[in-house]
Image (spheres, rainbow, N blue to C red):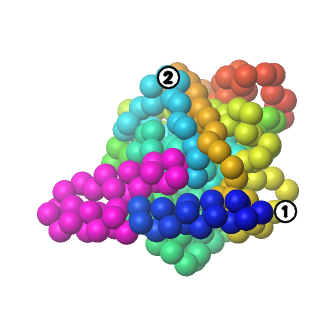
């Protein structure tokens, strides 16, 4: 227990130091009206601090792309941002979390509320605007975190932004794999977010995290958002190190 608390303290101090340095440099870049790489670099440094050794298989696109990825943990965001420079589509309530919400805005997070049926058109339009500007955007179509072994149903509602897609937009599926550490790192069930974060920060040792960047495809050939979701889910399932169970698209 003592060792775990010491690791927790050391990692928290390292995260604070990395954040302070990144914010200072980000401010200088913005002052000079330069595109700032520091939010992405901070997220990559945070992944290393929590113990991740990042491996990338394949080549991620950098612009005009929607990444569709399976989702295991908040660590996914650190890894994807470090490897691709992507922004994310996230639940609206995250914007109200102290500090975390503000940090999300630095990485140009697009906040949505799935339960806001009346506002869905505006949310789709914000996503389409980002794509028209050439952004790389990540959506976790499972809508929640899973156990890393079984894919949950892919929700296709936000993929209405690709029906039809802005010109030149591609879809690239990505499978995240934590290997032997999957059971320890996956955030499943009703575990509170703070408890999961503390458990990860107390964890001993490093772990291998692999991003399988699957071949991108043109969403216009799929015939709609549900077909896009189905194609991405099939590709991610096929990239699993062992056979994964799949479920119907909803």
Mark seen at residue 54 = none
Residue at 64%, 64% (x, y): give it.
6
What segment is highlighted magenta in the picture?
A: 20-49
Q: Residue at x 26, y 63 (%)?
A: 25
Q: Residue at x 45, y 31 (%)?
A: 60
- Taking 89 as reference, is 116 above or below it? below
Is residue 109 at least partly visible in the picture?
A: yes
Residue 173 appears anywhere in the view: no
Give whichever of 86, 207 is nearer the camera. Answer: 207
Main secondary-structure element of the magenta-colored stretch: helix
At x 73% / y 39%, what residue is drawn?
181
Pick the front one: 30 or 136: 30
Mark 1 neighbour class, 10 Å CA radius: few under 14, some 14 to 19, many 20 or more: few
Q: Is residue 156 above or below residue 10?
A: above
Tell me: 55 left or right of 61: right
Q: Is 172 or 5 nearer to us in this picture?
A: 5
Residue 79 percent across, percent down from the top left: 53, 44
Locate the C terminus by quadrant: top right
The residue wearing badge 2 is 58
In terms of image quadrants, where is residue 111?
bottom right
Q: For this view, does 177 lie left or right of residue 169? A: right
Q: In the rendered view of the protein, which quadrant contains the N terminus?
A: bottom right
Secondary structure of the residue carrying tag 2 is loop
Q: Which residue is mark 1?
A: 190
Task: In this rendered view, identify the residue nearer to me: 11 or 243.
Answer: 11
Image coords of residue 40 (percent x, y): 40, 51
Quick one: label 2, few (<14), some, or many (20+) residues within 10 Å?
Answer: few
- Residue 190 position (above or below residue 228): below
Point out the tag, 2 or 1, that comes first from the N-terminus: 2
Magenta stretch holds residue 181 = no
Q: Position of residue 20 (x, y in %)?
A: 37, 69
In the rendered image, the vertical position of residue 201 relative to residue 230, given as above or below = below
């Amino acid at each position: 227990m003592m060792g775990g608390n010491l690791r927790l303290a050391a990692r928290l101090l390292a995260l604070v130091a990395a954040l302070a340095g990144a914010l200072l440099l980000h401010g200088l870049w913005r002052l000079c009206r330069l595109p700032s790489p520091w939010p992405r670099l901070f997220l990559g440094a945070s992944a290393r601090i929590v113990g991740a050794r990042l491996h990338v298989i394949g080549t991620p696109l950098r612009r005009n792309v929607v990444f569709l990825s399976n989702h295991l943990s908040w660590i996914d965001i650190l890894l994807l941002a470090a490897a691709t420079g992507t922004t994310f589509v996230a639940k609206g309530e995250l914007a109200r979390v102290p500090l975390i919400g503000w940090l999300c805005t630095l990485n140009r997070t697009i906040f949505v509320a799935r339960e806001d049926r009346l506002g869905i058109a505006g949310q789709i339009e914000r996503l389409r605007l980002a794509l028209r500007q050439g952004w790389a955007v990540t959506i976790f179509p499972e809508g929640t975190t899973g156990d890393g072994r079984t894919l949950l149903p892919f929700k296709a509602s936000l993929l209405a932004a690709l029906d039809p897609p802005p010109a030149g937009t591609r879809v690239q599926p990505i499978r995240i794999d934590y290997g032997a550490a999957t059971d320890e790192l996956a955030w499943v069930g009703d575990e509170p977010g703070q408890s999961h974060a503390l458990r990860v920060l107390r964890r001993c040792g490093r772990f291998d995290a692999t991003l399988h960047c699957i071949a991108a495809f043109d969403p216009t050939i799929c015939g709609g958002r549900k077909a896009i979701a189905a194609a991405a889910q099939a590709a991610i399932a096929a990239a699993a190190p062992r056979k994964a169970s799949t479920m119907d698209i909803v």
